[in-house]
Amino acid sequence: MSDNSRFSVTRRGFLGTSACTLAGLTLTGCESGGLRFFSDAEASEPGAGGSYEKFSVCANCVNKCGIKAKVVAGRLKKLDPNPHFPKSRSMLCAKGQAGVQVLYDKDRLKHPLIRTGPRGSGQFRQASWEEALDHVAEGLAKIRDKYGASSVLFSSTEGLQEHFFREFSAAFGSANHVRHPSLCLASGNVGFFSVFGTVPAFDVANTQYMIFSGANRLESFITPDTIDLVDVLEKKKAKLVYLDPRYTVTASKADTWLPIKPGTDLAFYLALIHVLITEELYDKDFVARYTIGFDEVAAGIAGNTPEWAEQECGVPARQIREIAREFAYHAPRSFIYKGRRTSWTTNDTPMRQAMAIANALVGNWDREGGLVPKQSLRKGEVDLDVWPPLPDQDCIVSMEEKHPLANAGDGTYLDFREKVMLDEPYPIRGWFVYKQNPMHSLPDRGLTRRMIDKMEFVVVTDIMPTDTAWLADVILPESSYLEREDPVVGFQDPYPFLSMRNKVVDPVHDTKPNFEIMQELSRRLGFPEFFDYKIKAMQRAQLEPFGLEPESLEATGMWSDRKERTYGKSLKEGYRFRTPSGKIELASERFRRRGYNPVPVYEPQDAIPGNQFKLLVGKNAYFTHASNQNNPWLHELMPDNGLWLNSKPAAQRGISNGDIVRVKSAVGEVEVRAIVTERIRPDCVHLPHGFDHISPLMSRVHGAGACDSDLLISREDHISGNAALHETLVTVERIGDGKEVHA
């Protein structure tokens, strides 16, 4: 079967199918030929409790879609979408439905584990919670007493119980806590914030013209944007221009696909701005009333003509002009989409800033079909009247010095790892990781392993025995999102509303919610006052400003005081944007004050040597980073990964589809099957993220495929500190035959 034959479905046919898929994907391709709730052995086990349905919130990715759980005789039978939920709109994707197996996966962590052999040996013993928590408290206290509290590094990622982990690290007294944004969306946030003083939403449902750079929304879901994108394309209400070196599913549904040279998107956007200004296509009234810095931008892009950009990015000058004119013609119902994925290059923030500037020039801010400032409902808080102690030392990474415009509370992962490896300015000898898997999420997995080996004590709290957990001293099994209650969560898109994660079933194994783990550890370490409340009390405090009780959300699983998105509040007289000038800043005063160029300046990309390729990473809609590949249902949809390689360089190297190839970079090498395809530029290769887990406890994906983190070099965006994941060059050589695979 040829590579392209699998994608011969028509645009309208795909979109129609996608709409059904989004509404409720049936996981075909399983051994049973259809959707399985659980195995025959599991189904024969007796259940306890009655039968009921309950609304809750999914946790299999960051979207937090509304779910309705069907429980029969105490067992979760099915997860369906919550039809009342404004964000997910009666949609539940494959990951959401596969949440059933989060409960019943044989591989999940079932009880606390304490390491008994060398790190990485897999020698653990089962422990009681009392013993495990005592051991963790003793280990953390030992590090604190020997080196200081700040010699314990705390790492976490987004989630409704992450707040408790962050509170614990502060109460412990550590100055060192690093989160996920510097591996994800920091550069986009900093770039757009520099212009608008906020990070907006995008009114996809009502737009007429969209430009996406690498935002592969039809394969990497973000609700409600993906749902609305399917709708506006299927009904032909909007046109999509898509820039990406890969021909993704989103590219296949776009009206125009531009296979841009990797890392040159900024050249494209500067040329687009050039056309908007020199041809006077910008919204003159909007620019005059709401913005500052126009003259500085006009001077800055004087040399960034479409002809110049064509030489840099490979997009014809004629096409750049056409796109700029169409973009302006459809304004304000047009936008350039920010995207979510990590930085591509070390100059990524200026590229995102240029996106924001182009949007502002056509006056699409706070208007239907354009960019929309997010609004929120201010929740109440538990009043504990306690404050964390001042850290005993300064953070090992001075964000004020290195990345002053990034979020200091998030930190920057690559800088933290570098400082740990150098023991600067003081040693880090303990690492407490919550719901994070640095062994997969950070570039250069070998270096992350060496970082772990420097630690005297490592603790991991998770649901699955991840690669990072495999190397821990103690593993604390968290109750899944279906087995616990979480705080009230506020949503901002498409309009402000509240929801709550309810416990669907009692814990299947000997696990605890992270809140209880933090309570127990804080008591053992001498600061119990920080967690002197219950989750239900927190929920009541959060809902108090709205005159609601937790039971108020049971009927529909959500609450809001409005029913639709509103526009124009920030355009009213007297409104001040959260920028130094109080206006939309086309030339950023924040950047200027910190020594950065106030307007975007392009940095030419080095030519890719003829014997090498630029490595592109990316995700598939079945998985969230590296966290779902072992899920039984999702694993059957994509058991492993392969290296996308264009047919021309493949032929030059004697590589056929399915051959085993060796891929080498400056930091590592992998062996993986080749996927020979026309769907990628000849100077690039692509390896999907999240495979080849070293933990044998992840039985389905242990050793399956190849890990992109083994190849990625450590580079970061200059301004935000976001990991720049498209800076790695690799070589590819054939080493053997393999069975045929397809992209």
Image (cartoon, rainbow, N blue to C red):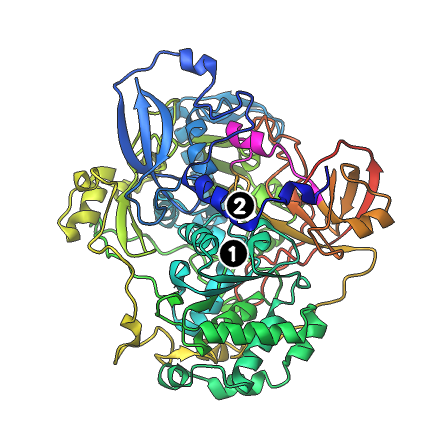
Q: Give the SS element for disc 2.
A: helix
Q: Is residue 606 left or right of residue 106?
A: right
Q: Is residue 610 left or right of residue 134?
A: right
Residue in the foreground of this view, choosing between 418 and 733? 733
Q: Amino acid at mark 1?
A: Ser
Instruction: Tally the numbered discs.
Output: 2
Q: Residue at the location (72% across, 74% down)?
A: 311
Q: Residue at the location (70% across, 53% down)?
A: 680
Q: Amino acid at mark 2?
A: Phe
Can you give x and y, in whole percent of width and height, for residue 272 in the image?
A: 57, 76
Q: Which residue is mark 1?
A: 182
| Quadrant holding the N terminus | top right
The answer to whether residue 743 is visible is no
Q: Give the SS element for disc 1.
A: helix
Q: Which residue is mark 2?
A: 14
Q: Residue at the location (42% across, 57% down)?
A: 409
> Which of the 4 image quarters holds residue 165?
top left
Residues drawn in magenta: 628-643
Q: Which mark is residue 375?
A: none
CB-based contact (under 8 Å), mark 2 and mark 1: no
> Which of the 4 image quarters holds residue 740?
top right
**Among numbered discs 2 and 1, the one appearing first in the sequence:** 2
Residue 630 colored in magenta in the image: yes
State the CA–CA distance, disc 2 to disc 1. 34 Å
Q: Is residue 344 above or below residue 731?
A: below
